[in-house]
Amino acid sequence: MEHAHGHGHTHRAHDFDWAAMVSFAEADAEVLMSFLDGATSALADLAAEDGLDVLRILDVGSGPGVAACALAERFAGASVVAADGSAEMLANVETRAERLGLAGRVETLVVDLPQGIDDLGRADLVWMSMVLHHVGDEGGTLRALRSKLDAGGLLALVEFGDPLRVVPDDVELGRPGLWARIDTAYAEWMAGMRAELPGAIVSADYPTMLADAGFDVVIDRIVAVRLDPPLDAQARQVALGYVERMRRHVEPYADAADLAALDTLIDADSPEGVTRRPDAFLHVSRHLFVCRAADR
Ligand SMILES: C[S@@+](CC[C@H](N)C(=O)[O-])C[C@H]1O[C@@H](n2cnc3c(N)ncnc32)[C@H](O)[C@@H]1O
């Protein structure tokens, strides 16, 4: 593993412990495999239509490497650089690539985003999933990604779609309207988290930022992944992990009764908890943008 940067991280209230999230992040990405299949297949179709030879792929903020490996499988002639700030995530990328027989084509690189983008080298395809919202200057980051591509190169940007759900909105869990209030609290958490990021500036909407950075948007699509009851053990653990994380994030913004409702959902011993209730499901949604680097 190469070390591209040695910038120290300052510790802020919203800092994430990514090292502790490796197994959850891998299970999370695996339950969204149908999304990855669809997205990588759309990218391969577009590359074929454009006559773009995809030889080098950057997965920026790769996390545990599920997408990096899926991209290596989809683009059999390409090498993939999985770049992330967490050495623990990258160790998982290496184990996963080895297990899937992809070790020769998936390499890892420690980067500190956004400045580390400078050291990533050029690419034919850049993939960035669920990472942009962790960077203070999203527009500047997209411009830096554009500089990695020649005109006609591809960018796939994945961000949050519709809010997550694990039980029906009208299920009896305390006061009616729980999920609308939790969505609001989550948005408040997100705004607070973003405001504390280094170099934080207010972002425009994605299409505006992408156009300003020199991209033509080809696909702008909300993709829903719906796992219906009964959930298997892995999906239940992912549902539990989502609600636990949500509970932590919304704590300062939600009232005690709503937090108690979330506590019931994450209680492994409660028949109303997501690990035991028969009606638990997983509705996760992602916003996918596929873009071509425009002529300058
Ligand atoms: C939510 S995970 C997304 C992982 C993966 N791309 C996916 O979609 O499943 C965010 C990843 O971005 C990395 N990350 C967040 N902020 C970063 C930064 N400033 N520099 C480098 N990596 C960062 C974290 O280590 C983590 O692996």
Image (spheres, grey):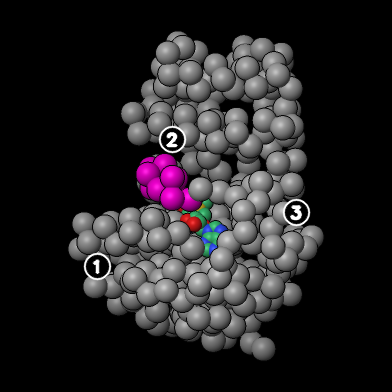
Q: Amino acid at mark 2?
A: Val
Query: Is the residue at mark 3 in contact range of ligand 1, meaning its CB lies under 8 Å from it?
Result: no
Badge 3 marks a residue whose secondary structure is helix
In depth, the one of 195 and 82 nearer the eye is 195
Give percent across and percent down for residue 236.
41, 28
Cα–Cα gap, marks 2 and 1: 27 Å
* Numbered disc in front, either 3 or 1: 3
Q: Residue 238 has which mark?
A: 2
> Could one spot residue 131 in this view of the protein?
yes
Query: Is the residue at mark 2 in contact range of ligand 1, meaning its CB lies under 8 Å from it?
Result: no
Give percent across and percent down for residue 231.
39, 27
Instruction: Give the magenta-colored segment's residue range.
Output: 18-27
Cα–Cα gap, marks 3 and 1: 38 Å
Q: Amino acid at mark 1?
A: Ala
Cα–Cα gap, marks 2 and 3: 28 Å
Q: Residue 195 has which mark?
A: 3
**Mark 3 or 1 closer to N-term?**
1
Q: Which residue is mark 1?
A: 103
Give percent across and percent down for residue 10.
62, 59
> Could one spot residue 282 in this view of the protein?
no
Residue contact between numbered discs 3 and 1, judged by CB atoms under 8 Å: no
Badge 2 marks a residue whose secondary structure is helix
**Mark 2 or 1 closer to N-term?**
1
In depth, the one of 246 and 158 nearer the eye is 246
Q: Amino acid at mark 3?
A: Ala
Residue 60 falls left or right of residue 234: right
Give percent across and percent down for residue 161.
61, 47
Q: Is residue 172 above or below residue 163?
A: above
Q: Residue at x 56, y 43 (%)?
A: 285
